[in-house]
Amino acid sequence: MSTATASRPRPRARLLPARDALDYDDFRERLADPGLADAGVAVALFRIPLLAVPVGGQRRGGYASFGQLVDAVQARALLRTVPGFPDLRIRWSPYRDTCHTVEWGEPGPPWWAGDEVFGTFYGYSADAIARFVRHHSPTSSSAISESCSLTMP
């Protein structure tokens, strides 16, 4: 690592309005209560704002994935200032190829639960869940997010 790279300050996470998130429209389309997308915030890291959706209605929890632990710590600190993100916690990953997550609300279903269980827990509409199930393997492994995905359910 060069001296210039080592001395360059790390980008800080920041909150932006929900509508500034790259995935805002996608969440509004999939949530049973699209208003939750409006109540969320965009967490911006490296100029990439992604939506963090609060709990409410049938949505009982949520999470955001981060490649670096320091980014997860920053995001958790910012989300503590926003209503709708109770019981914020970091799930640290000891594996290099798996992201750290910031979770909020109730703990998620067990990894072996079906896609319908996950979809309902995260507050997606019945139509969105049905579309997902139609286009993905019906195994429980399809409920597990891809490694290091920046998608915020």
Image: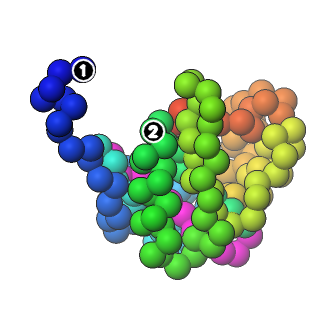
Q: Is residue 72 above or below residue 107?
A: above
Foreground residue, 68 or 139? 68
- Residue at (82% x, 51% y) in the render: 109
Horizontal and vertical percent position of residue 148: 54, 33
With 64 as the anchor, is 57 left or right in this view? Answer: right
Q: Is residue 100 magenta?
A: no
Horizontal and vertical percent position of residue 101: 58, 47
- Residue at (41% x, 56% y) in the render: 74
Magenta-drawn segment: 48-58
Q: Is residue 29 above or below residue 2?
A: below
- Residue at (27% x, 44% y) in the render: 10
Q: Residue furthest bottom?
A: 83
- Asked whether residue 126 is in view, the answer is no
How much space separates mark 1 and mark 2, taking CA atoms? Answer: 17 Å
Q: Which residue is mark 1?
A: 1
Q: Which residue is mark 2?
A: 68
Q: Secondary structure at mark 1?
A: loop
Residue 33, picture quadrant:
bottom right
- Binning the other alpha carbons within 10 Å of mark 1 as few (below 14), some (14 to 19) or many (20 upward) gives few
Residue 123, picture quadrant:
bottom right
Q: Amino acid at mark 1?
A: Met
- Binning the other alpha carbons within 10 Å of mark 2 as few (below 14), some (14 to 19) or many (20 upward) gives some
Foreground residue, 136 or 118? 118
